[in-house]
Image: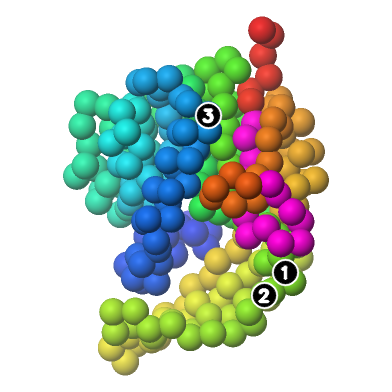
Amino acid sequence: MSKQKEWFEDWFDSPYYHILYGHRDMQEAEFFLRNFVHKFNPPAQAKMVDLACGKGRHSIFLNSLGFDVTGVDLSKHSISLAKEFENESLKFEVSDLRSLSVAGPFDYALNLFTSFAYFDDLATDEKVLLEIKKVLKPNGMLLIDFFNADKVLQTLVAEEEKENEGVLFQLKRRFEDGQIVKTIDVHHQSETHRFEEKVQALRLQDFEALLVRTGFELLHTYGAYDFSSFDIHSSDRLILIAQRKDVK
């Protein structure tokens, strides 16, 4: 019996995923990454891994700043597009975060724009963090950029429609079993397709516990891409900077 695909395997490899989210603001992403580099001052030629990199836009930008970057993603389609931009210091690989097969070790691991907690339980989140820890150098750094679950739940839009490139998307959101679930009905050329997104609504205390259990020390939390302070009620983002705990 063949194993049923998980939601992200179908959705992230679908062309509709890129149509729905292909208009994300790259200026905002560059603003965030420039602020990261300015604030933490990674050494020249630092090795970075961009986890769940999609088509590689963040990896490509970081590489343009002089860093050695490897982007990994589960989507073969996304990685095939990203590979067109490879060079001696920019590589892309297909890999599952639950069993990372990527050549490290890295100085920095980046998990950007809410690409964590796609799974159904905290045990799998722990496994992902342990895999990340394995590819980091001793005392290596981890950046996780997640949404502020408390604010998202307070302002959750139950239903909306979007039209991009002649494709109509009907989106429905709900909070169920600790997850924010988005049902995506796609209407295109007289055909209808249905996809789902599911992300655990992890709070700061959830991340604190996960990081401790997997051998990381949480150093800083921020609430926006300008690295301003995190506020549980008003911040849009939950940005965590952690360090692999090793003997110094």
Q: Is residue 210 left or right of residue 240?
A: right
Residue at point 63%, 70% (across, down): 181
Res 88 quadrant in image: top left
Q: Are marks 2 and 1 in contact (CB under 8 Å)?
A: yes
Answer yes or no: is residue 179 visible: yes
Residue 90: in magenta span: no
Question: In the image, is residue 82 above or below residue 147?
Answer: above
Q: Is residue 43 above or below residue 170?
A: above
* Callout 3: SS: helix
Q: CA distance from mark 1 to mark 3?
A: 31 Å
Q: Residue at x 58, y 15 (%)?
A: 138
Question: Which amino acid, mark 3?
Answer: Phe
Residue 52 % position (x, y) = 46, 46
- Left or right: 124 with respect to 7? right
Circle on res. 94 = none
Residue displayed at 76% across by 39% down: 208
Name the residue tied to disc 3: 40
- Residue 218 lies, in percent from the top left, at 71, 32
Instruction: Residue type at mark 1: give it.
Output: Leu
Residue denoted by label 2: 156
> Which residue is tagged 1?
153
- For residue 77, side relative to residue 102 (left or right): left
Segment tinted magenta in the rendering: 229-242
Where is residue 183 shown, x and y percent of the image? 56, 76
Q: CA distance from mark 2 to mark 1?
A: 5 Å
